[in-house]
């Protein structure tokens, strides 16, 4: 099968660790990793008949997603939490965290990290802006193209009446906000509607 061979070739030929390093660099450069993941995910979907889950991604990419998920945690606490999850197969409770790591838990009342985790937080923000920006642009363009078109009954779960009811910009940002579990105002603060790729 051609798609399976293409998937294997992409997995072998792609320097995933290098792309992850670029995405975590200062300043972060997530676009090459995102582009490579788009190609890989599309082929994976064709070959496996569904979207990849965390275990399906190349090891360096799993590390990237795990690191961004806990970007506000200092590296030593993050490593311990990931090792715990890998060994036990579940999330950790606060009582299970050894005393030597408890002081590393970022618990300030204003949500500010107590350690310098700026590199990872900036990498997460750059990744989110890229991913949410792409999602917004795609949805905006499709809604703009398909609204009012004869024969088109829905787009992204919106029917023709709801597509006509608001601007493509507002409809697209609402859809992205719902998927991202973020408020529209937060996405606007991130510059999603004005972000240029």
Image (cartoon, rainbow, N blue to C red):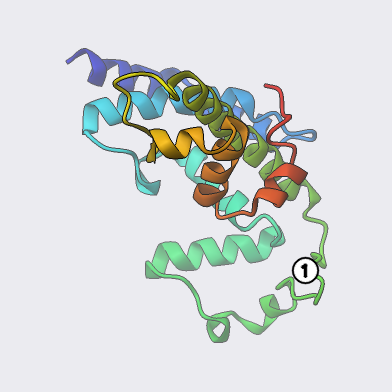
Nearer to the camera, 137 or 122: 137
Nearer to the camera, 194 or 155: 155
Q: Residue furthest bottom?
A: 95
**Residue 156 drawn at (x, y percent):** 40, 36
Tell me the quarter of the picture where residue 172 sits: top right
Residue drawn at (58%, 35%) of the image:
131
Residue drawn at (53%, 83%) of the image:
96
Answer left or right for 81 relative to 9: right
Q: Which residue lies furthest to the left in this view?
A: 1
In which quadrant of the rendered image does the N terminus lie?
A: top left
Is residue 128 depicted above or below 19 in this figure? below
Residue drawn at (67%, 21%) of the image:
197
Is residue 101 depicted above or below 65 in this figure? below
**Residue 126 drawn at (x, y percent):** 70, 37
Nearer to the camera, 87 or 36: 36
Q: What element carries label 1?
A: loop
Residue drawn at (47%, 28%) of the image:
37
Answer left or right for 162 relative to 166: left
Answer left or right for 133 relative to 103: left
Residue carrying label 1: 111
User: Can residue 147 be seen by looking at this rendering?
Assistant: yes
User: Can residue 15 be seen by looking at this rendering?
Assistant: no
**Residue 19 drawn at (x, y percent):** 59, 28
Question: Which class describes the residues within 10 Å of circle 1: few (<14), some (14-19), or many (20+)?
Answer: few
């Amino acid at each position: 099968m051609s798609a399976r061979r293409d998937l294997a070739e992409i997995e072998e030929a792609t320097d995933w660790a290098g792309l992850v390093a670029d995405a975590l660099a200062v300043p972060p450069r997530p676009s090459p990793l995102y582009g490579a993941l788009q190609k890989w995910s599309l082929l994976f979907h064709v070959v496996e008949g569904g979207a990849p889950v965390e275990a399906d991604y190349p090891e360096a990419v799993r590390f990237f997603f795990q690191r961004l998920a806990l970007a506000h945690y200092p590296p030593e606490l993050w490593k311990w939490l990931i090792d715990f999850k890998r060994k036990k197969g579940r999330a950790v409770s606060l009582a299970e965290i050894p005393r030597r790591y408890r002081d590393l838990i970022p618990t300030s009342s204003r949500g500010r990290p107590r350690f310098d985790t700026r590199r990872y937080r900036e990498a997460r923000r750059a990744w989110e802006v890229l991913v949410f920006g792409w999602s917004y642009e795609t949805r905006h363009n499709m809604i703009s193209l398909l609204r009012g078109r004869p024969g088109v009954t829905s787009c992204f779960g919106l029917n023709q009446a709801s597509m006509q009811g608001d601007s493509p910009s507002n409809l697209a940002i609402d859809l992205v906000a719902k998927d991202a579990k973020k408020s529209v105002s937060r996405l606007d603060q991130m510059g999603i509607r004005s972000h240029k790729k």
